[in-house]
Image (cartoon, grey):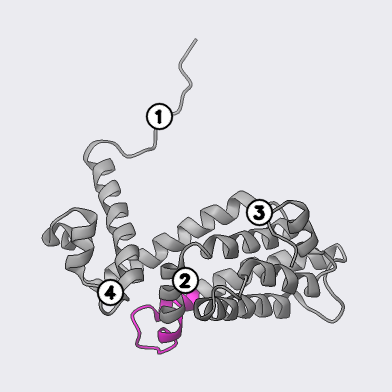
Amino acid sequence: MADTAQPSLKPRGPYRKTAATRVAILEAALEVFSESGYHSGSLRDVARRAGISNSGLLHHFPDKIALLDAMLDHRDEVDADAMRQYTRDGKSALHALIHLAAANASKPGIVKLYAILSTEATAADHPAHDHFVSRYARTRDFVREAFTSLADTGHLAAGATPESAAIGTLAMMDGLQVQWLLDPERIDMHYELAFYLSTVTDIDFVAELIEADRLPPQ
C-alpha cells in the first residue's frame, strides 16, 4: 500500500532553530517591556534575557520599533490561540473573553504594558499606533460577531445592537484593567465582566461561572 502520509510542514534544522530563537526574543521582549516599560527596556536587556548577543538580536529585529511590532503581533496570536480553544458559538465566544480576563489577572506586568501602550498609541506618530488600530478593529469584529449570533437567536438585550454591545464590552474590559491595576484586591475583572455581559444578554454568565466553580459567589 502506498504511503499517503503528508510531509511534515514543521521547520527543520537551522530554520527551526531560527524560529525558536525568534520566539525566545519575543518572549524576552515581553518580559523586559512588562517589567521596565517599553521606553526604559533596552535591546541589550532583551538580548541578555533571551540568552543571545546584541548583534544576534539585531539579526532578527533591526531596531526597537520592529521588535515592539513583532512582540505585539506574537502576543496577540498567543491570546487568539487561547480564545479559539473556548470559542464554538456566540455564547462561548463571550465565555472566552471572561476566561481571558481571568488569565490576565495573573499577568499584571503585561496588563500594565498594554494599558500604557494602548493609551500612548492614540498618538498617530507612536510606533504602535497602527497595531492598536488594527487590534481594536479585529477584536470589535470578533465580539460583534458573537453578539450578532446571540441576537439572531433572541438572546441580545432589548435596545442593544451587536455593534454597541461590542464597543461597550471592550470599553468595560479596558476600564476594568485600569481599575484592577490600581486596586487589585478590590476589583475582580472576570466577575465584573461576566456581570456586564449578563446585562446586555439574557444569559446569566455569573451564575454559569459560579456553577462551574470558576468563581466564588460575590
For label 3, the crowd category at 10 Å Cα-Cα, with few meaning under 14, some 14 to 19 and many 20 or more, is some
Image location (x, y in percent) of residue 47: 19, 60
Q: Which residues are magenta?
A: 118-134
User: Foreground: 53 or 35?
Assistant: 35
Residue at the disc numbered 2:
111
Residue at the disc numbered 3:
87
Q: Earlier in the sequence, mark 2 or mark 1?
A: 1
Magenta stretch encompasses residue 45: no
190 to the left or right of 3: right
* Measured Cα–Cα span from mark 2 to mark 1: 40 Å
Nearer the observer, disc 2 or disc 3?
A: 2
* Measured Cα–Cα span from mark 2 to mark 4: 20 Å
* Measured Cα–Cα span from mark 4 to mark 3: 32 Å
Image location (x, y in percent) of residue 79: 51, 59
Q: Earlier in the sequence, mark 4 or mark 3?
A: 4
User: What's the residue at 11%, 61% (across, down)?
Assistant: 55
The quarter of the image holding the C terminus is: bottom right
For label 2, the crowd category at 10 Å Cα-Cα, with few meaning under 14, some 14 to 19 and many 20 or more, is many
Image location (x, y in percent) of residue 90: 73, 60
User: What's the residue at 29%, 47% (across, down)?
Assistant: 20
Residue 116 picture quarter: bottom left
Residue at the disc numbered 1:
7
